[in-house]
Amino acid sequence: MVICYLLMKLRSFFYFLIAGVLALLALSAGGFYWLTTHTPLNLLKGGPTTTPAAAVFVSKQAPLLASMLVNPDRLESLRQVFATPAERSRSHAEFEQIKNTLLANTNLNYSRDIQPWIGDEITFAIATRDIDRDSKNGKQTGFLVALSSQNPDRSQQFLDSYWKKQGQFEQYKGVKLSYKQLPTVPKKTEPISPLSRFALPSSSLPSSFATALVSSSLDGTNYHNFVLLANHPQVLKDAIDNVEVANLNLHNKPEYQKALQQLKQGRIALAFFNLPPSETQEKPDFSLASLGVTVGVNRRGLVAETALVTDRQNNAIPTLSEPVPALQYIPSTSPLAVASTSLNNFWTEFSSAISGNAEVSKLVDRTLRNIQTAWGINLPQDIFNWVTGEYALAVLPGASNSSDWIFVAETSADSQQAIARLDEIARSKEYSIGNFTLRNQKITAWTQLTTSPNYGMGKKMKSAIETEAKGVRATVGKYEIFTTSVEAMDQALKAAETGSLVANQDFQTSIEPLPPSNDGYFYLDWPSSRGIWEKQIPLLRLIELSARPLFDHLRSLTITSTGETAGIRKATIFMRLY
């Protein structure tokens, strides 16, 4: 009896133990599920949504749509995960600064007015270049912002509170529009730069600020609530019309869908540009229709994919599976390098692509003209045409804020004839051509005799005549190496021994997230080259101020092309951050 009693008690204990274990496992599974679904590390795979639902509000002809597909607070949480304890306070302050800047002069507070209801999508669109589509009375760009709402009641309370003591109201197709008194349409809109076709909005609300709370669905079943903000009530009316008539909105545009199909990596942001049509009467070989860009999060920074949609149906697979060996002659100290194959083909396609845009063509032509004037050569004819194999181009920092260039090109059937042509150009400019030995390598230099500026000054007078190298060349194995100084040539020749760029750990880290099959790299070490670019491009300082948190944390920028599918040219960009 005692034994039976003990067995019964023991069995009850086992039942209790098993039930407890099962309960614990269930609790652990639930906790694990909660952690895996709510942890900010999930953003490494992409945001909660992959396609902006607000695209249905935007016209298929809109110049620009840009969407962030994640709640801002989750993005900040992810940054805090990777930040060191010392950096977390600064990181939080930077996010607060961004929020305050975007809401400057609006009398709105993010924590009080927006955070309680904002969801996982923020979409900005340049809805139209001219709101009333009448250029005779001037042009006024239409802007639209769509904020997804996870709590429609709270977002409606926010709108009611904002418009409580101001504004007008109007019903349009069942949607309540709220707006301020309309100003007169300006007679003229000043562009912000020669390359702009529209003026960007200021951080303060325009006098014709308008809002609405609406719902939309991409598939007819899953509805999303949005707070729409615009700089004119007509922009909101157009947005509502775009939802009702499917073939009017961007979501149903074939080029938009084609671009998204090619952009497959996890994304937290997306942008789509409708590129302007060709401005020249001469029809180019192919024209650029639109550009899609997605941005994802990497543990070391941001990875962006681009899809350039053209009007042709070409297919091209990447030509490389590893960095070109020509990079072995680029020193590891180079802050800028470009390496690929077939420079002649690249130039042919590039010049054809930009020929339809007069402004971009003028910019490229002006840059080429400045280089050609300084060097006395025609770059397409004298350099690009014969470079059919590997090539690498790099900048080396020099003394007194000056820079040297290194160009390495694989020899081809036309390279010797091209070099002979360069010698003729040098002689026509009265340069001397001489040979000497450097690191047991035969070197050819194009030199010019100059008068020393220090002649006759001080106790030790220098020679009145000095030799200035205008260009230096060497044939090393199957490569032709060109530099702008003897010092740069010396660094190129010893790069394989002292450390080339391709063997540099920073460079390897900067290309690691990029597809191994590609068409080459554009590499920029931002801290090392920042001063050079700010000196050459004055407008860059203004751009840095507008995106200061990004530029302050930018370590390097690497771009690679990854082939073409059905006329869609693809590329990947990695922004390595501190």
Image (tube, rainbow, N blue to C red):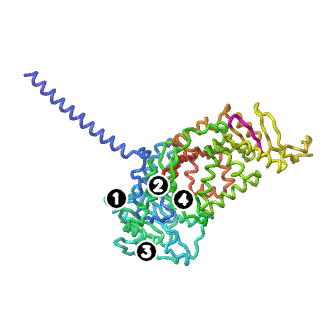
Amino acid of disc 4: Leu
Residue ranking furthest to the left: 1
- What residue lies at 54% left-to-right and 59% top-to-bottom? 288
- What residue lies at 34% left-to-right and 62% top-to-bottom? 152
Q: Secondary structure at mark 2?
A: helix
- Camera sees residue 396: no
Residue 141 pos. (x, y %): 52, 69
Which quarter of the rendered picture does the N terminus lie within? top left
- Camera sees residue 353: yes
Label 2 – label 4 distance at C-alpha: 13 Å
Taking the image as shown, residue 410 lies to the left or right of residue 199, namely right
Q: Which residue is mark 1?
A: 219
Rate crowding at label 1 as few (under 14), some (14 to 19) or many (20 or more) other CA atoms within 10 Å: few
Label 1 – label 2 distance at C-alpha: 19 Å
Which quarter of the rendered picture does the C terminus lie within? top right
Residue ranking furthest to the front: 413
Image: magenta residue range: 470-478
Rate crowding at label 2 as few (under 14), some (14 to 19) or many (20 or more) other CA atoms within 10 Å: many
Examine the image and state in which quarter residue 556 appears. top right
Taking the image as shown, residue 51 lies to the left or right of residue 425, namely left
Dot 1 or dot 3: first in sequence order is 3
Disc 2 vs disc 4: which is toward the camera? 4
Q: Which residue is mark 3?
A: 167
Q: Secondary structure at mark 3?
A: loop
